[in-house]
Image (cartoon, rainbow, N blue to C red):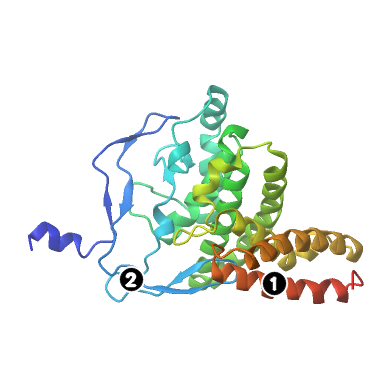
């Protein structure tokens, strides 16, 4: 084995040879990418919100593929999924350029000074998703910003959950819960868009995830809408009568996923089983609130 190969075997990531040019500020940089294989990832269980947990690697420490998904300009902090990086209308470009200072101030108030020239880690990973959510606010419907904001919100919630575990005194749990609530609302909006066609949500099909190991696609949207609605029903609808309406709507959509799964051999087993359990929990919860029996 060569010295270079030996050195690479101890690294998690590398810099791409080709230069990435920021469409907002023209900054040149080399995008960081994760090495594949080499025993870097040790997959653990799947959580209820469809997050694939990874065990800490004795050789490499913490390793997360999500760290490297988003492209982020080190200079102006423009962030997006790679396929949307250069596809920017002039009005969007201008809006993103005008908010550079606001973007940096906002993210540094939460996470402190950041340097995206450095290697991605927990803090930069969290920042990349917050920045993407902010930037997609300025994007037009042609890039389907809503489902992408939903994915960024739930991934951001996972990052801030990990940050809270690492630094429990810094209040990251509050940001975690706000991001989960944002995801709950945005997944609900995504379901509406799937029916109305106001955004080409198929543009986001390859990145709906919500994690990077298994893309649950539109089934994941349906399941997460129901899971997050149940979890944050008090914040989304404080009155019991409004909760019944909210939950009944999510249950009907979930029933379609569960029903189609029973009649389709191609439906993935884990999400079908989790949907069945969630559907049963919905029945109990709605009845406890005085709803349908």
| Quadrant showing the C terminus | bottom right
In depth, the one of 131 and 289 nearer the eye is 289
- C-alpha separation, residue under disc 2 versus residue under disc 1: 34 Å
Q: Can you identify the residue that label 1 sits on?
A: 278
How busy is the neighbourhood of tag 2: few (under 14 within 10 Å), some, or many (20 plus)?
few
User: In percent of the image, x 68 and y 59: which residue is there?
Assistant: 225
In depth, the one of 86 and 131 nearer the eye is 86
| Numbered tag placed on residue 61 in the rendering | 2
Report which quarter residue 201 is drawn in: top right
Residue 129 percent across, percent down from the top left: 51, 51
How busy is the neighbourhood of tag 1: few (under 14 within 10 Å), some, or many (20 plus)?
many
Tell whether 283 sits left or right of 27.
right
Residue 2 percent across, percent down from the top left: 7, 60
Report which quarter residue 48 is drawn in: bottom right
User: In percent of the image, x 48 and y 68: which residue is there?
Assistant: 52
Q: Earlier in the sequence, mark 2 or mark 1?
A: 2
The answer to the question of whether label 2 and label 1 lie on touching residues, with beta carbons closer than 8 A, is: no
Residue 218 percent across, percent down from the top left: 60, 53
Question: Looking at the image, which residue sits at the far left?
Answer: 2
Q: Say if 136 sits above or below 91 in the image.
A: below
Q: Say if 207 sits above or below 60 in the image.
A: above
């Amino acid at each position: 084995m060569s010295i270079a190969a030996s050195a690479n075997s101890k690294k998690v990531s590398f810099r791409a040879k080709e230069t990435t040019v920021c469409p907002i500020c023209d900054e040149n940089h080399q995008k960081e990418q994760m090495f594949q294989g080499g025993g870097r990832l040790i997959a653990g269980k799947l959580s209820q919100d469809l997050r694939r947990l990874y065990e800490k690697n004795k050789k490499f420490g913490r390793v997360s593929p999500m760290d490297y998904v988003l492209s982020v300009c080190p200079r102006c902090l423009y962030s997006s999924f790679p396929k949307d990086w250069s596809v920017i209308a002039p009005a969007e470009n201008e809006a993103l350029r005008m908010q550079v200072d606001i973007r940096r101030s906002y993210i540094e108030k939460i996470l402190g000074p950041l340097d995206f020239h450095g290697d991605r880690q927990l803090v930069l990973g969290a920042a990349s998703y917050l920045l993407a959510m902010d930037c997609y606010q300025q994007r037009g419907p042609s890039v389907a910003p809503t489902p992408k904001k939903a994915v960024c919100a739930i991934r951001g919630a996972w990052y801030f959950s990990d940050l809270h575990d690492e630094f429990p005194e810094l209040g990251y749990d509050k940001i975690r819960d706000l991001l989960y609530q944002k995801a709950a609302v945005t997944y609900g909006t995504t379901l509406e868009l799937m029916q109305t066609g106001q955004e080409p949500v198929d543009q986001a099909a390859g990145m709906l995830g919500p994690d990077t190991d298994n893309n649950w696609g539109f089934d994941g949207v349906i399941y997460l809408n129901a899971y997050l609605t149940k979890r944050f029903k008090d914040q989304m609808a404080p009155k019991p009568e409004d909760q019944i309406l909210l939950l009944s709507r999510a249950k009907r959509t979930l029933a379609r996923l569960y029903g189609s799964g029973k009649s389709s051999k191609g439906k993935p087993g884990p999400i079908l089983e989790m949907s069945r359990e969630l559907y049963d929990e919905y029945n109990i919860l709605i009845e406890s609130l005085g709803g349908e029996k």
